[in-house]
Amino acid sequence: MGIKYDGLFRLLKEKNIAKTQLQKRLGLSSTTVAKLAKNEPISLKVIENICKELGCQPGDILVMEKDKPDNQLLKMLLEEKEMKLKGGLYHMTQIKFSYNSNHIEGSRLSEDQTRYIYETNTLAPEGDETASIDDIMETVNHFQCFDYILDHVFEKLTEDMIMTCHKILKNNTSDNRKDWFGVGEYKSRPNTVGDSATTSPSKVKTEMAKLLTEYNVKVNVTLDDIVEFHYRFESIHPFQDGNGRVGRLIMFKECLKHNVIPFIIDESHKLFYYRGLKEYEYEKGFITDTCLSAQDKYKEIINYFMGEET
């Protein structure tokens, strides 16, 4: 088990209290402050004193994290990412994930064009069709988002992490030039999912905090838990646009973190996916079956590159 004091430093920042101020108020030794900075154990009495000073609970300032599991899939993805290996699992995942997730949301780039952008950082035209700059940027940005979730895969989900993912996804797009849009920020105007209303802008922060709190206390996270989080996230629809892509990136991250085989929702299953989200409260099986089908397809890709059953 490991300890992280991320909550403490976040709380100090919110209250505009410097670490040196806290140290003086509580008479903490330099050794104790150093242990906090290094995420090392400190006495329960010190934790109680900090909580009393800041008016919070121990769970607000520290979290006990499990040791990282032996996850061969994640190891392969991280190693190939670091090596910049071409033609491997990481390479194929980047292309298929970006193409399908963006295509579900209306991108007109083909999978071949997506591959060409990834491999050459240029665009190959197809026939007389022109390509949208936004489609191109969101394809490139999705590659970066995937790297971001890999780099932070074992960290717990936070609002900052989700907002950063959205900011990366929408960077340098036309939406980024709209003052009211709020790239990397929660929506300022009401939006819908299909014909269904979503959480009003004034309640988004509260509902997101509630969703994350309830999710992060789960101990043995399953595929069902991840799918439920996705449904609730999409129902809130916290951002003006880009919610589906951010939500599917979160699902992939959480699957990797909890040793669940991840998956990519195929563009051809878009209608089943949307139906599953729409009817989730009445029949959870629709969206679960779609995710399991996508999981089977990704297993085939994993087995090909690992050369064994997963």
Image: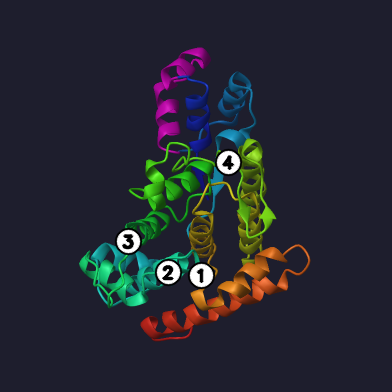
How far apart marks 1 and 2 lie (CA) works out to 11 Å
Q: Secondary structure at mark 2?
A: helix
CB within 8 Å, label 3 to label 1: no
Viewer-closest of 200 and 245: 200
- Residue 172 sits above or below residue 129 on the image: above
Is disc 2 surrounded by few (<14), some (14 to 19) or many (20+) residues within 10 Å? many
Residue to which mark 3 is pinned: 136
Viewer-closest of 161 and 31: 161
Q: Secondary structure at mark 4?
A: loop
Viewer-closest of 5 and 272: 272
Is disc 1 surrounded by few (<14), some (14 to 19) or many (20+) residues within 10 Å? many
Which label sits on residue 189? 4
Residue to which mark 1 is pinned: 262
Relative horizontal placement of residue 282, taking residue 145 as reference (left or right): right
Q: Which residues are magenta?
A: 18-39
Give how far across and how far down residue 10 sits, in percent: 49, 32
Residue to which mark 2 is pinned: 97
Classify residue 112 by image quadrant. bottom left
Give how far across and how far down residue 61 sits, in percent: 56, 34
What residue lies at 43% left-to-right and 26% top-to-bottom? 33
